[in-house]
Image (cartoon, helix red, strand yellow):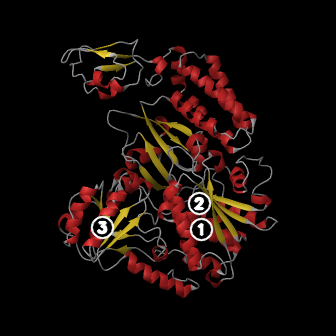
């Protein structure tokens, strides 16, 4: 039965019980079970460990937890033996899990497959860090690197992600044990709505969904707006290619979002909220459903929350996967059961939003920051980041980078440090070329500008946007014309088609890029592409169309010579555009290993074993399979 939390004493009791579960006086095993872990095989690892523990009547605990960010090391397993550091084991297969289990069941701490140790659990909202052990470490534990010594972690600071990887997201008491819902109690019992809004404003929190609008200003406007009821909304419709920040936050710490919305609702004067989450996130949806039910059963959603007289409840709305529904007015139309189409912005949603009533919309990450601001204080929060961009930002670091994962860094960290230190750089034999920031509506920043600090204003000046936090690293094998085509293809498919600039302008831009990639374009077309991009940017109805030309404009701004090579030289410098490249085999370096011939789907490569091979260009479909399998550099592409 769910514990009832109706007052401060109940919160303290819930915290006490939660702490005994978070830090039991018996061994504990945690398995990362977010989507990234499950995709890597974590379910089989968890099932094995859980079954073994049950069969052995083991005096320990096997739990699920969320993503701590090391997606490239999944599946992750953590072991906590009282009096010792928390040890993380990487890339754990069922076979490895079985060997780990045998040692753990015998009371030993396994020494193989160790990634790092965690000495201190820095509990963001709860009175200071907790050290896992006392005394001095010896043996392999002393030699195991600490979390904060890892290049992937050194620059990071987890605030929104504070509980991810530490708690069972389905256990409300775990959240309370780490300080959860205490900020809500503070807001409801010791602060007026205006004081809450002032704290968020003073902290300098800006919307993490892409626009970067000051959160406190938006809240104040919604509170002052006339009309009832007022709605508090959470945008979890994360649709950017390569982005999974919001999904991971929900899967790892759903109550942080719920608590943030509760605090916001109190400040604004709302009794009803919605979380709009895409149905393609099945684990996130189920996690939210369970969290909402648990909070409702505990009395933290519903009537007279924490005995304050404040009432608020949250409904879940599943989106069909339309990228345009990430736009505020399209999202609200979708909740109303209408087609997800944006409307003109001369009427603000804080005045007339959902059902034509005052509505406040923030994204998942924004809401997750709110309890920290109330719990730690606005002054504490604003010390992090830059002058115009306070706090931290979560990014999904993907693409041509070694350490693919979820990272949370203070605003102001440079692109270079994020890619080279946190990300570990691009694969060997490749060179960093650009980074695409801000999703399909973001921009491509080249290596010449990789000392650029990552904050709202700096990215805007460079022609990009923060976006929700998608970050795709590109190396010298990437064609920027092809990149622009890719994002336009996505945006054309996702456009609602309501306004002409977006509906027709993007298609014409795509046609011009296709001409470039086939060697048929002209410099006049290049001028048309640039002017058309500006027209679409200025004339589109909503932010999707208004920012859609960003990938084109930034690639034109920073990689114009690459465009000109396609047009004037009929050459793709990155050897990507099929119409402009040819494959051949160098007889001087080919040793006749036959790997390329075996891989060719068209039988375009012939030759005797241990003799130089030849490639028939009339049969070659330029798939690149031969180039990928050749280990001797004999296959050339030009």
Tag shown at residue 260: 1
Q: What element carries label 3?
A: helix
Left or right of residue 405: residue 484: right
Residue 606 in the image, given as x and y percentages of width and height = 28, 15
Q: Alpha carbon of mark 1 to alpha carbon of mark 3: how far?
A: 37 Å
Mark 2 sits on what residue?
Answer: 366
Residue 380 in the image, given as x and y percentages of width and height = 53, 68
Residue 429 in the image, given as x and y percentages of width and height = 32, 32
**N-terminal-most mark, 2 or 1:** 1
Q: Are marks 2 and 1 in contact (CB under 8 Å)?
A: yes
Q: Do the residues labelled 2 and 3 touch (CB within 8 Å)?
A: no
Q: Is residue 147 above or below residue 331?
A: below
The residue at 38%/70% (across/down) is 121
Which quarter of the rendered picture does the C terminus lie within? Answer: top left
Tag shown at residue 51: 3
Q: Is residue 509 above or below residue 18?
A: above
Task: Choose top left, top right, bottom left or bottom right for residue 550.
Answer: top right
Between 229 and 321, the one lying in front of the other is 321
Q: Are marks 1 and 3 in contact (CB under 8 Å)?
A: no
């Amino acid at each position: 039965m769910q514990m009832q939390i109706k007052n401060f004493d109940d919160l303290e009791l819930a915290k006490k019980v939660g702490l005994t579960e978070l830090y039991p006086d018996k061994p504990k095993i945690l398995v990362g079970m977010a989507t990234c872990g499950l995709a890597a095989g974590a379910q089989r690892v968890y099932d094995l460990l859980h079954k073994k523990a049950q069969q052995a009547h083991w005096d320990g605990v096997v739990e699920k937890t969320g993503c701590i960010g090391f997606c490239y090391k999944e599946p992750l397993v953590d072991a906590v033996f009282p009096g010792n550091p928390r040890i993380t084991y990487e890339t754990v297969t069922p076979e490895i899990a079985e060997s780990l289990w045998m040692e753990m069941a015998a009371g030993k701490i396994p020494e193989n497959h160790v990634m790092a140790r965690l000495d201190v659990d820095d509990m963001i909202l709860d009175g200071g860090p907790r050290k896992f052990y006392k005394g001095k470490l010896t043996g392999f534990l002393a030699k195991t690197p600490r979390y904060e010594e890892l290049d992937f972690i050194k620059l990071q600071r987890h605030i929104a992600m504070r509980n991810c990887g530490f708690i069972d997201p389905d256990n409300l008491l775990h959240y309370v044990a780490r300080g959860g819902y205490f900020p809500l109690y503070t807001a409801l019992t010791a602060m007026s709505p205006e004081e809450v809004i002032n704290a968020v404003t003073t902290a300098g929190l800006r919307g993490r969904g892409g626009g970067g609008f000051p959160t406190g200003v938006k809240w104040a406007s919604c509170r002052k707006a006339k009309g009832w009821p007022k709605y508090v909304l959470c945008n979890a419709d994360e649709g950017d290619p390569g982005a999974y920040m919001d999904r991971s936050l929900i899967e790892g710490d759903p109550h942080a979002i719920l608590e943030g919305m509760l605090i916001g609702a109190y400040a604004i004067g709302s009794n009803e909220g919605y979380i709009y989450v895409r149905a393609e996130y099945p684990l996130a949806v189920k996690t939210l459903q369970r969290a909402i039910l648990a909070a409702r059963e505990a009395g933290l959603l519903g009537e007279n929350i924490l005995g304050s007289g404040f009432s608020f409840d949250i409904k879940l709305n599943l989106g069909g996967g339309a990228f345009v529904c990430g736009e505020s007015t399209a999202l609200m139309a979708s909740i109303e059961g209408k087609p997800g189409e944006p409307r003109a912005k001369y009427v603000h949603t804080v005045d007339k939003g959902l059902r034509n009533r005052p509505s406040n919309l923030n994204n998942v990450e924004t809401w997750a920051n709110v309890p920290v601001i109330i719990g730690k204080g606005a002054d504490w929060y604003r010390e992090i980041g830059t002058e115009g961009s306070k706090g931290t930002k979560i990014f999904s670091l993907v693409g041509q980078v070694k350490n693919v994962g979820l990272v949370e860094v203070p605003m102001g960290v440079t692109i270079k440090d994020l890619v080279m230190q946190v990300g570990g750089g691009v694969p060997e034999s490749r060179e960093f070329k650009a980074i695409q920031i801000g999703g399909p509506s973001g921009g491509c920043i080249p290596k010449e500008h990789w000392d650029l600090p990552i904050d709202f204003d700096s990215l805007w000046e460079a022609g990009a946007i923060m976006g929700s936090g998608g970050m795709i690293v590109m190396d010298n094998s990437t064609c920027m014309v092809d990149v622009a085509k890719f994002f336009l293809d996505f945006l054309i498919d996702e456009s609602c088609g309501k306004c002409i600039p977006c509906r027709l302008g993007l298609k014409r831009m795509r046609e011009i890029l296709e001409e470039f990639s086939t060697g048929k374009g002209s410099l006049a077309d290049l001028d048309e592409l640039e002017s058309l991009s500006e027209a679409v940017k200025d004339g589109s109805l909503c932010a999707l169309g208004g920012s859609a030309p960003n990938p084109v404009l930034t690639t034109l701004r920073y990689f114009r010579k690459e465009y000109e090579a396609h047009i004037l030289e009929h050459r793709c410098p990155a050897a990507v555009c099929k119409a402009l490249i040819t494959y051949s085999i160098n007889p001087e370096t080919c040793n006749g290993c036959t790997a390329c011939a075996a891989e060719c789907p068209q039988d375009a490569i012939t030759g005797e074993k241990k003799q130089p091979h030849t490639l028939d260009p009339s049969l070659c479909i330029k798939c690149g399979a031969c180039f990928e399998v050749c280990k001797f550099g004999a296959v050339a592409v030009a």
